[in-house]
Each structure stands twice: as C-alpha cells, then as structure tokens.
Amino acid sequence: MTSANPYSEAIALHVTDAHHDLVIQRPSAGLALQGRIRVPGDKSISHRALMLGALAQGETVIHGLLLGEDPRSTASCFRAMGAEISELNTEEVRVKGIGLGNLVEPVDVLDAGNSGTTLRLMLGILASHPDRFFTVTGDGSLRSRPMSRVVKPLQQMGAQIWGRKQNSLAPLAIQGQVLKPIHYHSPIASAQVKSCVLLAGLMTQGKTTVTEPALSRDHSERMLRAFGADLTVDPETNSVTVTGQSQLTGQTVVVPGDISSAAFWLVAGAIVPGSDLTIENVGVNPTRTGVLEILERMGADITLENQREVAGEPVADLRVRHSALKACEISGDVIPRLIDEIPILAVAAAFAEGTTIVKDAEELRVKESDRITVMATQLNQMGASVRELPDGMEITGGTPLKGAEVDSYTDHRIAMSLAIAALNAAGTTTIHRAEAAAISYPDFTPTLQRVTGLG
Ligand code: S3P
C-alpha cells in the first residue's frame, strides 16, 4: 500500500524504558508549517487558578486549564490539603474552596514534581498557616533549585522553614506561623518570589508590599484582584501591595493559550521557508510579550489578529509567516518578560544573520536545567555557533544546522526548542528524554506532526 504521505515516519516518538526519543527527519525538499492551531492553557495562570480556587470561599470554575504535569502537581498538593478539585480536563474544572487559612495539615509529603511555581507559591501559603506542619519536595531538578529567594522574605515575616544548605533546598519542612506584613525589596525580578510573598501577606494583619527591580509577570495581581483581594499596584516603582485578611471569593477563570508554548510555533513559522501558521487564542499580557517584541526586531513577520480581553487577560490570534531574520541584543528589562522563551529565541538566533547577544539572563542557570549551558552545548552539537556567557550567550547565526543526537536534560522547553531547530536541520535529529515536553505541552509531538504534515 502506498502511503499518501511519503514522509509518514519523518516525525516519530520511540519509547525506550521510561524515556522517549523524538526522531525528526527533515525531508530533503524541506517542509512548511501551515494551518491554524491552538496551544494549551497558560501554565502560570493555571497554577494560580487552582491555588486561589482552593483558598477562596465558594466554587471556582476553570475553563482551559493546562493539563500538563506541572498543574497536576499543584492540584494534587491542594487536594491533599482539603480542597475538592474535580478531575482535570480542559473544558471545565471545578474547585470547591475551603476559605483562607483553612488548609488541612497533609498527612504526607507534598510533592511539587518538576514545578518551581508550585513549590515557591505554595511555600508562602503554607508558612502562613499557623499550627500546621508541612513537608514539601520535588523531583531531582526541583530539589537542586534555589529556594532561599522565597525562604528569606518569608523568614523576615516570621516563617519557620528548614531544609538542606541553610534551608535553601527542598525537601523543606515548614511549621506554619502567624506572619507579620513586610515591605520586601526583591533583588531579582521574579513573579514566583513576588507571588509567594503576596500570598503569605494575604494571611497577615496589615499591608505587605513587594518591590522588584523590573516588572515580572502580573498574573497573580490580576487574579488576586478578581478574587476580591485588596491589592494596589504602583507601576512607577514596580511595587504591589496586598492588605491581609480580605476574603477571596471563587470565580470563573478562562485560561488563555500559553504564549510560552506559542513561541515554539512562532519561531518555527519564522525560520522554516514557506510557512504560514496561525496560533489562535494566545494570552498577550504585556508582562509576557517580550518574545513578540524581540522577534519583531529580528525581522519576523508576525501579526496580532482578533485582539480581545478574556476574563481579565488580553488575548489575540498570532499569525506568523516565514521571513529572513537578523541578529539583535536581548538584555535589560525585557528579560523577565521573555525569560522562558530564551531557549527558543536562541534557535531563532541560530538562523538569523549576524551575532545575537543574550545578557542579564543569569536566571536561566537555575531553571528546570541550566538553560545557558544546555542550549549552547546542544545547539553546537547540531553545528550552530553558540558561546556561553556567565549571564547569557552569544549566538552567531547563518551556519546551516545538521541533524544530531541531542538531549533535553529533562527540561521541557529544551526538548521543544531542539525539536524546532531540527525542522531546519539537514538529516535526522534524535532528541533524548523528549517526554519532558509533557510538563507544559503534552500534545507537542502530535501538533508538530500536524502542522508539518509529517505525521
Ligand atoms: C513563573 C515565573 C517565572 C517563569 C516560570 C513561571 C510563574 O519564574 O520562569 O516558568 O508562574 O510565576 P520567575 O519569575 O521566578 O523567574
């Protein structure tokens, strides 16, 4: 029987033990990405909807929740502390909140899996639940990521937290306390730190303020307000203040598509000749759109269509067509607005004319993997020219990439970035441990097969 698609094996997943190899064989005639797709729900908003839903009074209904591994970790932690959360699905998840301060002491260790957002935000909530004891952990990657950035401000509020390396590494033990409000000047622009302190502040008597050096994503602020918290923002000083002890009330949350997941398709469409792809229903909150600004500066042809506001978050359809890219500098205040997109922007830079410099991004070294070292070594393996900097990388584009054996280092964004690079690399690329994509994008491979026609 002749197959209608001569490249039917061109994108295949091979399951080996617990791990998956994603094998991508670029047809010699090249390929183009076409059509209209949707990306899964925003990861940051999904976590927050589950957490605030659990802390609120009454029912929260979540439409469009991300079904990735990370929000599953959040749901299971809050279930273990008494919140009733219906079976997770994208259509509708119902959370029966138990009211601020009413979490039940869990009888076992809370496992945040691979998710920094789950662990760091949850720490603010746990530390401020007096008379209850909690232990929290995560997978090998999360157990090596710095928690002192949240433990320190929580200790200033009076929290009691213990762990390895001067209480900075999970597993952590927390004896909940009555905390006091503080004004925290965060040394880093981190939405996880900001959100952790604000969530702890919810339970205090008085005003808790977080000031950050540059604006990080503001989903917590938007959602806390929608749930009825008394919260004010001072954009002049990048400060947010929450007044404690206001009750939260369950809401309907509509989760937009994740711009961090859309970014893979934006870069794929930009670098693969002949592409014309529309990604529908993507969240375009200005604290997240650094990737659009940088791709535009690099000469990408991206248009925002059908711009609208859905449940307090701006949303648009993004259309991308192939175009020649040029290098640019990525540094300064834009970094927190595109921090998760730097691996895929490094792929764009590898196909851009000139040398792209990424600076001020040392945070990349403490993400799910050291994203500077891993992207540099893996792209170089494919023939790219990437030089590591202490706080970023220098990528000289233009050398044609070739297929190679590469590894995700169990980091979801690395797995997907390398898959997009493989679409424009001659021959066959094998990405080891590609199952990591399921952390934020469980349907990544079938979507890749569909938009390339290489199913
Ligand atoms: C997130 C904040 C970011 C981001 C992470 C999700 C959040 O981390 O990298 O993937 O949901 O608050 P930091 O703001 O801590 O850098």
Image: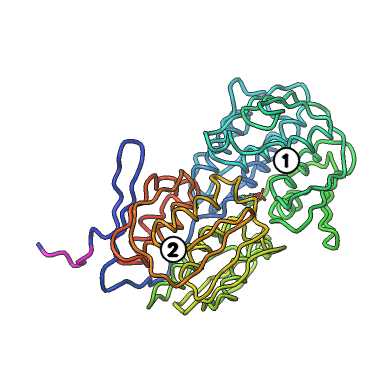
Quadrant where the C terminus is found in the figure: bottom left
Nearer to us: label 2 or label 1: 2
| Residue 72 spot, x, y in % from top left | 52, 40
Q: Is residue 143 left or right of residue 425?
A: right
| Residue 71 spot, x, y in % from top left | 55, 43
Is residue 5 one of those drawn in magenta? yes
| Residue 431 spot, x, y in % from top left | 37, 51
For the record, the magenta segment spans: 2-7
Tell me what residue is drawn at x 46 percent, y 79 percent.
Answer: 323
| Residue 155 spot, x, y in % from top left | 80, 32
| Closest to the observer, 220 or 342 | 342
- Secondary structure of the residue carrying tag 1 is helix
Q: Name the residue furthest left.
A: 1
Q: Which residue corresponds to mark 1?
A: 149
Count all numbered tags in the image, as a single digit. Answer: 2
Is residue 304 one of those drawn in magenta? no
Q: Is residue 121 above or below residue 330?
A: above
Tell me what residue is drawn at x 36 percent, y 40 percent.
Answer: 19
Q: Which residue corresponds to mark 2?
A: 384
Residue 25 visible in the shown view: yes
Q: Is residue 403 left or right of residue 411?
A: left
Tell me what residue is drawn at x 53 percent, y 49 percent.
Answer: 92
Is ligand 1 within 8 Å of the beta carbon of the residue shown at mark 1?
yes
Amino acid found under the numbered disc labelled 2: Ala
Q: Is residue 316 left or right of residue 264?
A: right
Amino acid found under the numbered disc labelled 1: Arg
Q: Sequence order check: which comes first, mark 2 or mark 1?
A: 1
